[in-house]
Amino acid sequence: MIEVTDIHKSFDKLQVIKGVSLSIHDGEMLAIVGPSGAGKTTLLQIVGTLERADSGSVKFDGEEITGLKDSKLARFRNRNMGFVFQFHQLLPEFSLEENVALPALIGGTKRSEAFSHARKLLDELGLGNRLDHRPSQLSGGERQRAAVARALVNDPKVILADEPTGSLDSHNREELYKLFFDLRDATGKTFIIVTHDDTFALKADRVIHMKDGLIV
Ligand code: ADP
C-alpha cells in the first residue's frame, strides 16, 4: 500500500535519512526500532507526509504523493493518516468530544456527524463517560486513548504512532498496544509504530531496525 523508494533527507548539513526504501502492506503492524537519532521519527514523518524528503519517492496505493502541493497534501493527510504522538497533544481548552471531532471538522465533515462519530469512538474506547472532560481531568492512559480516538475519526487507512507509550506506565503501555492490535484485527488498518518497547516489537508483524539513517 505504501511504497517508499530511496528517500534522502538532511537538516542543514546533517544527513538524517541516507537512502531508505520500504514497502508497507495493507493491514500490517509494523514496528520501527533503533537507537535515538537513527532517523526513525523523520522516516515516520516522511511516510505520514508531515515532512518532505529531499529526494526519492513515496507512493500510496500507487499514487505518487511526494510532489503534491501543500494544500492537496494536507487534504490527503487528513483523509488517510491518523497520528498518535508520545504526548497526547490534545488541546487543553477543548473537551474530549471536541478534540476528537476536530480533524473531522477540518476535513469538512458536517458538525453533527463529526460530533456523533467522536462520541461513538470515545464510547468504544471506554471514554463514553468523559465526553465533556478536559484533557487535564484524565489519567495518562485515558488521554492516550482519546488521542487514538482522534486519530481514528476520519477513518484513515494508516495509523502512525511515534513512541505512543513513551509517557505511560507498564499497565497502560500494554493496554494501548492491545488496543492497537484489536483495532488492526477489527478494521484492517495499517499501523506504523516507532517504539523502544521490545515487548511490542516482538509481537509486531515486522520490525524495521534503523541505524544512522539507514534500515539495517
Ligand atoms: P530518532 O527518531 O531515531 O531518534 P530523529 O528522526 O528524531 O531520530 O532524528 C534524527 C536526527 O535528525 C537527529 O540528529 C535529530 O537531532 C535531527 N533532526 C530531526 N528533526 C530535525 C529538525 N527539524 N531540524 C534539525 N535537525 C533535526
Image (cartoon, helix red, strand yellow):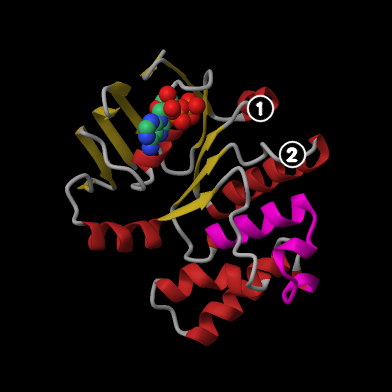
Which amino acid, mark 2? Arg
138 horizontally vs 11: left or right: right
Q: Which mark is residue 197?
A: 1
Span of residues in magenta? 129-151
Q: Kindly identify the residue that appears in the image at 71 percent across and 43 percent down.
A: 178
Residue 66: quadrant of the picture = top left
Q: Magenta: predominant secondary structure element?
A: helix
Furthest toward the top, the residue is: 216
Q: Tell me: residue 31, above or below residue 145.
A: above
Residue 39 visible, this angle = no
Furthest toward the bottom, the residue is: 112
Mark 1: secondary structure:
loop
Q: Tell me: residue 81, above or below residue 172.
A: below
Q: Kindly identify the residue that appears in the image at 37 percent across and 19 percent down.
A: 213
**Earlier-in-chain disc, 2 versus 1:** 2
Q: Tell me: residue 96, above or below residue 55.
A: below
- Ligand 1 image-quadrant field: top left
10 Å neighbourhood of mark 1: few (<14), some, or many (≥20)? some
Residue 24: quadrant of the picture = top left
Mark 2: secondary structure:
helix
Q: CA distance from mark 2 to mark 1?
A: 9 Å
10 Å neighbourhood of mark 2: few (<14), some, or many (≥20)? some
Contact between marks 2 and 1 (CB within 8 A): the answer is yes
16 horizontally vs 114: left or right: left
Residue that numbered label 2 is attached to: 173
Residue 46 visible, this angle = yes
